Amino acid sequence: MPSEKKLMRGSNVVGEAAVRAGCRFYAGYPITPQNELPEYLSARMPEVGGAFIQGESEIASINMVLGAAATGVRAMTSSSSPGVALKQEGISYMAGQELPAVVINMMRGGPGLGNIAPSGADYYQATRGGGNGDYRTPVLAPAGCQELADLTFTAFDIADKYRTPVMILGDGLMGQVMEPVIFPDPIDIKSLPPKDWALTGCKGRKPKAIFSMLLDLNALYNHNLHLQEKYDEITAKELRWDTAMTEDAELLVVAYGTPSRIAESAIEELRAEGIKAGLFRPITLWPFPTIPLRKLAAKIGKVGVFEFSMGQMLDDVIMAVGERAEIYFYGVPGGIIPTPSDVARFLKSSIKGDGKVGRRIEA
Amino acid sequence: MIKRTLFAGFGGQGVLLMGYVLSHGAMHRGLNVTYFPSYGAEMRGGTANCTVTLSDKKIASPVASNPDLFVAMNYPSLEKFEKSVAKSGLIFLNATLIKEEVSRKDVEVIKVPTLELAKEAGSDRAINMVMIGALCAKSGLLSLEDTVAGMQAALKGKEKFFPLNRKGIERGFAFIADGK
């Protein structure tokens, strides 16, 4: 049955939700600001007969997840920015081998080791992928603890359905914030569709193999066409986004994750003064909700993009909106958390078009 | 209704625990709540702070522009955050440590002699419980029962500390009621 309302930290929420979504294998290597997640699972996994492994490194951990996923078990790893950079090779291999798994990134400041403050500077890394080859990773961007719980279920379902690694992109703030959460029912693992491709021991049947090396030229060519078909299907079926207060808006604010919540409070501050702005919040960052954003932006005529980075999602907004609306940008790099009032000043400046806070983007 | 409270002080003064108590108490009262702690290097020996937002509606940002209530447990915190407090806001000073005056004239200042009151309640370690009691009593955010329920939820598994912490909370409520 669904849980009682529980006050929980974002990182722990992901751990509990993963267990309830049927995850029975976790491997990871510690890094702030997401250590509460492996800490939680180190106690929780044994309770449900699952495996928790603190690997010797991020690279070892992602490859353990690859191995576990190949046996058909729901598997997950988590880290923060520099740690996720190390996992990119494994993600590319899982994409090539069509192995389902969930990768959590609670983003912190970069580049390099950076700092432990919240950041949104891994948008490129998540949506474009740091690994090699023609692959895409579905990326889900929750905005709070309840959505962290719900989208963890979604992530495992998308991973299994399309046989692909899926990323949940949060940030250090989201990992640390506590909010009341109601968890969905635990799933019955036996009720999941069978994975006839899984490597479960070949006694009594023909041996199977899973690998990403396809030396035959036609085989790799056809494999990539097959992957692309899958990515097209994900783009058609799995787009997710949310809007708020857009009906009468003079400015459309585009933000995901924690910045979308700061932006929503900024919009509320403006509305108290009679200034009308609305919010467009991508929930899938890949696939990006290009067409819905394009339509709404064209109708409203002005777009303000706000990110915890110097302009990464901005590229997707420019591709979606182009010359159909004026685009303004306000980016805050890792380390500093702007307040709703800071964002409200940017939005006011964008509505006036004076460029005093943030900057005008020529698309 | 939306109320944002900022707690700040030295690591070790129980600053984050005050935030837990308020958050759990608010949930007990049926309100929406977000709790956002500082988790930086400052937690390891320097200043610590957390922001708790309570509302009967959906809460958008866990980050507050201008807190309505501010608890300063030491002078560096007062100096750092005083300016950010909303007009007509409440500033609660740990008067045991802070001898300086608040320079703002558009806020109400409540000076709580936490250590003296905590000793009266039975333990000099209960300064944070005295302060959260005073905060909830003065602001009307939580009743005594909800505050105690919040403390018990926040310290689940550490039941042996309940009676002493309860006395601390009660002392904070009594200080606001009697002015002493």
Image: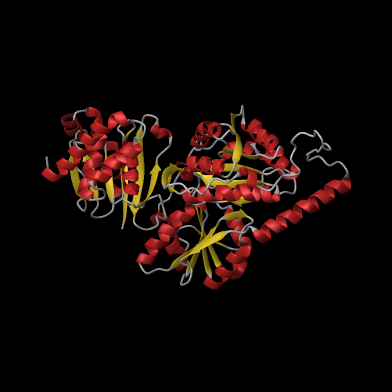
- Identify the image quadrant of residue A7: top left
The residue lying toward the viewer, choosing from B11 and A140, is A140
Q: How many marks?
A: 0
Picture coordinates of residue A229 (x, y %)? 76, 56
Q: Kindly identify the residue that appears in the image at 53 percent across and 50 percent down.
A: A150
Q: At 33% from the left edge and 47% from the top edge, which residue is drawn?
A: B28
The quadrant of the picture occupied by the N terminus of chain B is: bottom left
Up-down: is A58 above or below B37?
above
The image quarter in which residue B50 lies? top left
The one of A184 and A337 positioned closer to us in this rendering: A184
Quadrant assignment for the C terminus of chain B:
top left
The residue located at (63%, 33%) in the rendering is: A61
Looking at the image, residue B24 sits to the left or right of residue A217; the answer is left
Question: Is B61 positioned to the left or the right of B101 in the image?
Answer: right
The residue sitting at 69% across, 40% down in the picture is A72
Residue A10: where, in percent of width, then height?
47, 43
Image x and y of residue A338, in percent: 43, 50
Side of B91 where A41 appears, left or right: right
Residue A325 appears anywhere in the view:
no
Q: Position of residue B75 (x, y in %)?
A: 26, 37
Which coloring applies here? secondary structure
User: Is residue A82 at all visible to an observer of this figure?
Assistant: yes
Q: Is residue B91 above or below residue B129?
A: below
